[in-house]
Image (cartoon, rainbow, N blue to C red):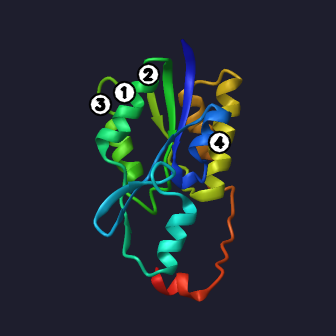
Amino acid sequence: MARTAVATDSNSGITQEQGKELGIFVLPMPFFIKGKLHFEDIDLTQEQFYQMLEDDTPVSTSQPSPGDVTAMWDRLLRTHDEIVFIPMSSGLSSACQTACLLAEDEPYQGRVFVVDNHRISATQAVSVLDAKKLADKGKSGLEIKNILEKEAMDATIFIAVDTLEYLKKG
């Protein structure tokens, strides 16, 4: 059985294909478009998503359902001893807090380590890649969580948009 699985959500920018190549597990984020549920990089590409924004299509986001989170964890715990899960920043979504609460329940307690290192997008992806390197070196889930949370504020990200229209849309 493999020791430590590293998992994240698609807010990290890591695609399903990249995750498979890297040995990282990616939970797709849900979107509602015209009232219909879609999952990032499963049935909705980034190109389609941005085209919908440009077309003023009503799009709203949501956190993954607790059932989707625990289903992923259950699959991973069949082949791994433990999981380091790195969701998007707790400052931007309640998804991290939900995952933390779920990780306190049996059978996850002491086996699933949720990292809240206040990151999103590229900086979140860096944390995920760092976690994978640490796991490959034999660090435990708790050790990885502690390292990533200690380094939480050691990253900066600058964001630029093509047009002010994206900012006006929120």
> For the residue marked with disc 2, what is the amino acid?
Leu
How much space separates mark 4 and mark 2, taking CA atoms? Answer: 21 Å
100 displayed left or right of 113:
left
Determine contact: label 2, label 3, CB under 8 Å: no
Is 15 placed left or right of 160 in the picture?
left
Is tag 4's residue or tag 3's residue first in the polypeptide sequence?
4
At label 4, the amino acid type is: Gln
Question: Cβ–Cβ below 8 Å for labels 4 and 2?
Answer: no
Q: Earlier in the sequence, mark 1 or mark 4?
A: 4
| Residue that mark 3 sits on | 105
Q: Position of residue 136 (x, y in %)?
A: 69, 25
Residue beneath label 2, please?
A: 77
* Measured Cα–Cα span from mark 4 to mark 3: 30 Å
Q: Residue at x 59, y 35 (%)?
A: 24
Image disc number at residue 49: none
- Looking at this view, is 27 or 147 the one in front? 27
- Is 157 rendered above or below residue 71? below
Neighbour class for label 1 at 10 Å: few (<14), some, many (≥20)? some
Kindly indicate whether the residue at mark 3 contacts the one at mark 4 (C-beta within 8 angstroms).
Answer: no
Front position among marks 1 and 2: 2
Residue 38: percent from left, percent from top: 38, 56
Dots 1, 2 in contact, CB < 8 A: yes
Q: Which residue is mark 4?
A: 18
Instruction: Report the Cα–Cα distance between label 1 and label 3.
Output: 6 Å
Q: Determine the secondary structure under disc 3.
A: loop
Nearer the viewer's eye, disc 2 or disc 3? 2
- Which numbered circle lies on residue 108? 1
